[in-house]
Amino acid sequence: MKKCSLFRKASDIKTGVIGYGPSFMMGKHHLDGMTEAGMRICAVADIDVERCKAAAADFPGIETYSSAAEMLAKSDVDLITVITPHNTHAELAIQCMDAGRHVITEKPFAISTDECDAMIAARDRNKVMLSTYHNRHWDGWILNARQKIESGIIGDIIRIDAHLGSYHKPKDWWRSSKTISGGIMYDWGAHFLEYSLQLLKGRMVEVSGFMHQGFWGPSTCWKKDCIEDEAFSLVRFDDGTYLKLLFSNLDSNPKPGWLEVCGTAGNFMIQPNTWTAYCQESSGPVVKDGPVGDSETFRFYQNIVNHLLGKEDLVITAEWARRPIHVMDWTARSAAANRTLQAKYP
Ligand SMILES: NC(=O)c1ccc[n+]([C@@H]2O[C@H](COP(=O)([O-])OP(=O)(O)OC[C@H]3O[C@@H](n4cnc5c(N)ncnc54)[C@H](O)[C@@H]3O)[C@@H](O)[C@H]2O)c1
């Protein structure tokens, strides 16, 4: 069923999701967010019949389908959010766009730069909307950090040091498979890169990737295909700023904070709940801190609705979503090739 609609009000937009997984109840989260934004939730597709039953229990009367193909054939939903494991995002998104539907994928947008390009081409040939669920664009701590850093609290940014690490064996689930998840960076890396690229305004010039593999692999059930033990990326921008990104399951000395933004007049720590800035003032070094404000995640679907009604530009465009994927993809390719790679998309 091919469909391209013009909408007059939010409730004209009929929505569905593909994937109603149990891990974080993301299907329910999305359907609740779509409802809150005023859209009409209609359908769920999941290859697991038990998950279709769970959706029907959570949303009595909702249509359920055992595959994306069945949903596309039988349902006239206008907008579909894809909430499945990472290696399925590109294929499902293209299938939906070729059926004339507007599409949002969960993060990460896709795994490779080539997949992103194919998705953008499908968007353009079908004249539909394509976005990805960068809900964390509106996290309280990044909204707060942007406001404080842009007001000059640490001077000019020279570098961001983003890291997440601890010493642990990967869990027994699909996120520990490199083929399915994309690798150790692809879960929180998508968020950390999206945070960082909001702050670093230069054009991306080159990516150097470093990876360690094989320590945990033999001891996990994903042994043929385990994610890296550690991945490190160094990204150079044309204004002289640079980004260091580290994800590690072999870090015995976890660092405080998530993102440390280093400026000419101080360092700013981005982390949940509280912010801290180590500032250089004329009177000497001063430590400032405080709570972060509430997250405004609802703004994602609010923007989607306003965009589909022709009232606002799309905030999370496919071109924006491609940048974090490009860094993670180039990191792996650079590590494998043992050399720095020029960025294709700045
Ligand atoms: N934005 C966030 O804050 C956030 C939080 C959690 C998860 N996620 C993302 O959500 C996505 C799903 O993660 P999850 O934790 O919900 O996984 P999950 O394993 O709990 O659920 C995935 C669901 O997809 C279904 N599925 C798999 N392939 C399918 C297909 N081809 N067609 C239809 N259904 C299919 C599975 O049966 C399962 O029910 C991932 O991209 C993940 O990174 C994002």
Image (cartoon, rainbow, N blue to C red):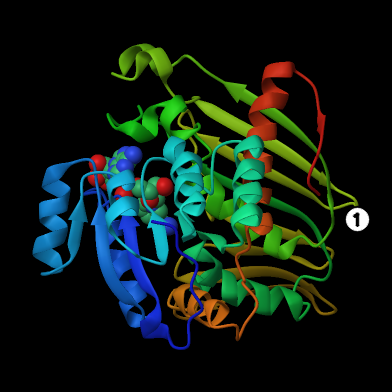
- State the residue lying farthest toward the right: 239
Label 1 residue SS? loop
Q: Dividing the picture into quarters, in which one does residue 343 lie?
A: top right
Residue 253's spot in the image, x, y percent?
50, 37
| Viewer-nearest residue: 81 or 225 | 81
Amino acid at pointer 1: Asp
Residue 324's spot in the image, x, y percent?
64, 48
Q: Does residue 214 sit above or below 48 in this rendering? A: above
Q: Mark 1 points at which residue?
A: 239
Q: Does residue 275 sit above or below 247 in this rendering? A: below
Answer with left or right where residue 300 lies relative to residue 113.
left
Name the residue at 90% across, 51% down: 238
Task: Locate the N terminus by quadrant.
Answer: bottom left
Name the residue at 12% across, 69% down: 61
Name the residue at 32% across, 62% down: 16
Residue 278's spot in the image, x, y percent?
68, 67
- Classify mark 1: residues with Cα within 10 Å, few (<14), some (14-19) or many (20+): few
Residue 25 seen = no
Residue 2's spot in the image, x, y percent?
44, 58
| Viewer-nearest residue: 103 or 110 | 103
Name the residue at 12% across, 61% down: 56
Q: Does residue 266 sit above or below 22 in this rendering? A: below
Residue 103 seen = yes
Answer with left or right where residue 174 lies relative to residue 328.
left
| Viewer-nearest residue: 128 or 242 | 128
- State the residue lying farthest toward the front: 1
- Does label 1 point to a residue whose CB lies under 8 Å from ligand 1? no
Total numbered circles: 1
